[in-house]
Structure formats: structure tokens, C-alpha cells
Image: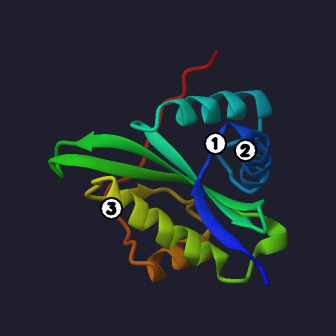
């Protein structure tokens, strides 16, 4: 029997999280993997749970997926909201419904943390991901994401 759990990440999970982030960033147009940068960011999130949390999907105590929730205060919503980032199920565990379980747990977790909304971004051409999120109740926004990156 398979033991499946969804739990908050801890420092002993950093290497597994960075491995998943490398897999994720190899699929995304705007980002590339850099283990040092990812490890620093993961450590910062884990050190400040009031600013964000990383949830892990574990199967038989092996990290099989992750999602991060970062918190903001929205003046439009009048309170705390979450930015859902870095959701991935490891390639060897896909097509088993685990993504749906992890996303559902993340939604419940954000709601339990007092969040009034969850926002996420997908690559514009990733129709499969957009369809997946729409099936879970997410809708397209009229807002257009823009960014300015500050180079080192």
C-alpha cells in the first residue's frame, strides 16, 4: 500500500525541492535553474512561514511534488491573498491524479491561512496547465502580467 501525504516542507527537504525546481524551470520559458538561487529562496520561505509556505506531496516518504504559496496583502480584496508558484509533480509520478490532490490541498491550506484569493501564472502557450487549473476553478484574469528584472 502506498503512503501519500501532503505536508509543509522543512529544511531537510531543500535538496529535493531544488531538484523539483530544476525540473520545473527546464519546462518554463521565463526561468532557468540555478541551484544556489533556488536553495537561497527556499531557505528564506522556510524561515518565514508568515510570508509563504511550501507544501510537499510525499509518497512513501519520497518527495513527489511541491507547490509554494507566497502571501501578500491585497487592497482590492481587503486582506491576505496567496500567489501560487512552483507547482510540479515529478515526471515519474505524473498522470496519477496527484497534481489535483496537491492543488486541492494548497487551496484548502491557503483558505485555512485566511487567504481571500489565489493567483497563479502559467506560460502563455501551456494550454495543458491552463486547462488543468480551469478544471480546479481558476479563471483567466483581465490583468496582464508584466515584470522588470533587476540584473546583478
C-alpha span from label 3 to label 1: 21 Å
Crowd rating for badge 1 (residues with CA inside 10 Å; few <14, some 14–19, many 20+): some
Asked which quadrant contains residue 125, the reply is bottom right
Could you tell me if the residues under marks 1 and 2 are in contact, i.e. CB atoms within 8 Å? Answer: yes
Give the vertical position of 10 relative to 135 (above or below).
above
Could you tell me if the residues under marks 3 and 1 are in contact, i.e. CB atoms within 8 Å? Answer: no
Instruction: Tell me the SS state at disc 3.
Output: helix
Asked which quadrant contains residue 129, the reply is bottom right
Instruction: Tell me the SS state at disc 2.
Output: helix
Residue under the image location 45 percent in, 78 percent down? 136
The residue mark sitting in front, 3 or 1, is 1
C-alpha span from label 1 to label 2: 6 Å
Residue beneath disc 2: 13
Crowd rating for badge 3 (residues with CA inside 10 Å; few <14, some 14–19, many 20+): some
Kindly tell me whether residue 127 is visible in this rendering: no
Would residue 98 appear left or right of 110 to someone viewing this image?
A: right
Give the vertical position of 74 relative to 129 (above or below).
above
Residue 19, percent from left and from top: 80, 47
Using the image as rendered, state which of residue 92 and residue 124 is in the foreground.
Answer: 92
Which disc number belongs to residue 10? 1
Would residue 79 appear left or right of 48 to someone viewing this image?
A: left
Crowd rating for badge 2 (residues with CA inside 10 Å; few <14, some 14–19, many 20+): some
Give the vertical position of 66 relative to 137 (above or below).
above
Q: Residue furthest top?
A: 152
Residue under the image location 62 percent in, 76 percent down? 128
Using the image as rendered, state which of residue 21 and residue 27 is in the foreground.
Answer: 21
Residue 110, percent from left and from top: 38, 58
Q: Residue furthest right?
A: 92
Asked which quadrant contains residue 10, the reply is top right
Residue beneath disc 3: 111
Residue under the image location 47 percent in, 32 percent down? 48
Amino acid at each position: 500500500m502506498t503512503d501519500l501525504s501532503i505536508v509543509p516542507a522543512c529544511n531537510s527537504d531543500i535538496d529535493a525541492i531544488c531538484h523539483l525546481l530544476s525540473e520545473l524551470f527546464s519546462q518554463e520559458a521565463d526561468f532557468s535553474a540555478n541551484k544556489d538561487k533556488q536553495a537561497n529562496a527556499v531557505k528564506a520561505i522556510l524561515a518565514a512561514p508568515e510570508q509563504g509556505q511550501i507544501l510537499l506531496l510525499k509518497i512513501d516518504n519520497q518527495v513527489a511534488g511541491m507547490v509554494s504559496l507566497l502571501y501578500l496583502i491585497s487592497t482590492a480584496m481587503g486582506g491576505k491573498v496567496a500567489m501560487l508558484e512552483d507547482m510540479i509533480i515529478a515526471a515519474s509520478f505524473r498522470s496519477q491524479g496527484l497534481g489535483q490532490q496537491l492543488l486541492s490541498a494548497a487551496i484548502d491550506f491557503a483558505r485555512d491561512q485566511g487567504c481571500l484569493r489565489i493567483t497563479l501564472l502559467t506560460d502563455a502557450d501551456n494550454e495543458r496547465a491552463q486547462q488543468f487549473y480551469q478544471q480546479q476553478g481558476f479563471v483567466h484574469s483581465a490583468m496582464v502580467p508584466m515584470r522588470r528584472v533587476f540584473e546583478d
